[in-house]
Image: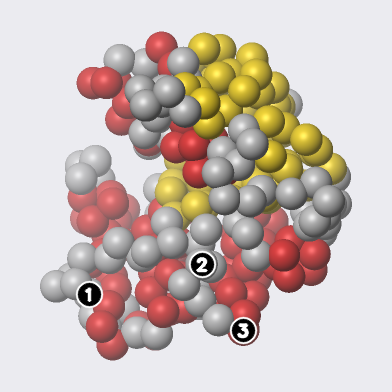
């Protein structure tokens, strides 16, 4: 069953630049998909359209049954509650502890205190940070901060996790730790993961589905793919 359907999507910015041309894509529930491509290929634009930071100029994007392009701005929260987002910069709140940073995602939607505690501890356990609940972001390594960001993104058990260059600020060893965490989340929770990356080593090691974009066009969609320099 498809969680995401992208039909004949084009994205043209106001400055006249077309970032995506006639994109068609279907992503099944429970998939783990890398989106790869060089600078300006449209990776980040695609991710942003999936969480409605950007709207397509033409075409249709369906995420979990919601027609994203047609969503009114005041209804975007309905989409955002179905997904988690992880960025390259961790975007943690510096004055809150690890626990409070993750809990914040549930507090804003009015979850009860008992429910928050159960879900936060489970999410922190899933990213192997249960022993850091009282620490503040500046007491953590970059890899640990990113794991807190992942815990915050999965705490409400979203069906979809969007990751935009989540290992971009990390060394190869920490990057692989993050990939292990994401792989475990995909397997244990059944969360669909879409990750934009330029990290060739990660893509080649993980052997997941690979969507390759070049100059805004889909040039390849492989099952158990690798980072093919010719395509990029």
Image quarter (top left, top right, bottom left or bottom right) of the N terminus: top right
**Which numbered mark, 1 or 2, is in the foreground of this view?**
2
Report if residue 12 is visible in the image: yes
Alpha carbons under labels 2 and 3: distance apart: 12 Å
Residue tagged by mark 3? 173
Q: How is the image coloured?
A: secondary structure
Residue tagged by mark 1? 97
Q: Is residue 98 above or below residue 212?
A: below
Residue drawn at (23%, 21%) of the image:
74
Report if residue 130 is visible in the image: no
Circle 2 SS class: loop
Alpha carbons under labels 1 and 2: distance apart: 24 Å
Instruction: Compare marks 1 and 3 and give the one earlier in the sequence.
Output: 1
The location of residue 197, given as percent across then percent down, is 60, 56
Instruction: Compare marks 2 and 3 and give the one earlier in the sequence.
Output: 2
Q: Nearer the viewer, residue 26 or 116?
A: 26
Quarter holding residue 82: top left
Residue drawn at (65%, 70%) of the image:
180
The location of residue 126, given as percent across then percent down, is 52, 68
The total of numbered circles placed on residues is: 3
Q: Say the numbered circle drawn on residue 198.
A: none
Q: Nearer the viewer, residue 13 or 108?
A: 13
Instruction: Compare marks 1 and 2 and give the one earlier in the sequence.
Output: 1
Residue tagged by mark 2? 168
Alpha carbons under labels 1 and 3: distance apart: 25 Å
The location of residue 92, given as percent across then percent down, is 27, 65
């Amino acid at each position: 069953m498809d969680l995401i359907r992208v039909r004949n999507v084009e994205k043209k910015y106001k400055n006249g630049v077309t970032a995506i041309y006639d994109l068609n894509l279907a992503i099944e529930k429970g998939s783990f998909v890398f989106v790869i491509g060089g600078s300006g290929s449209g990776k980040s634009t695609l991710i942003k359209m999936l969480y409605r930071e950007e709207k397509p100029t033409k075409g249709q994007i369906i995420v979990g049954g919601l027609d994203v392009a047609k969503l009114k701005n005041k209804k975007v929260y309905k989409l955002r509650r179905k997904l988690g987002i992880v960025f390259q910069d961790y975007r943690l709140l510096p004055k809150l502890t690890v626990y409070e940073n993750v809990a914040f995602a549930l507090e804003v939607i009015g979850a009860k205190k008992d429910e928050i505690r159960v879900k936060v501890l489970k999410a922190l356990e899933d990213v192997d940070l249960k022993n850091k609940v009282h620490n503040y972001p500046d007491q953590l390594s970059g890899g640990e901060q990113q794991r807190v960001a992942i815990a915050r993104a999965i705490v409400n058990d979203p069906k979809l996790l969007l990751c935009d260059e989540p290992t971009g600020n990390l060394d190869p060893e920490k990057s692989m730790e993050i990939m292990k965490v994401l792989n475990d989340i995909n397997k244990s929770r059944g969360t669909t993961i879409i990750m934009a990356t330029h990290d060739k080593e990660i893509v080649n090691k993980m052997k997941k589905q690979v969507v390759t974009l070049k100059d805004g066009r889909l040039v390849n969609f492989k099952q158990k793919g690798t980072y093919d320099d010719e395509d990029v």
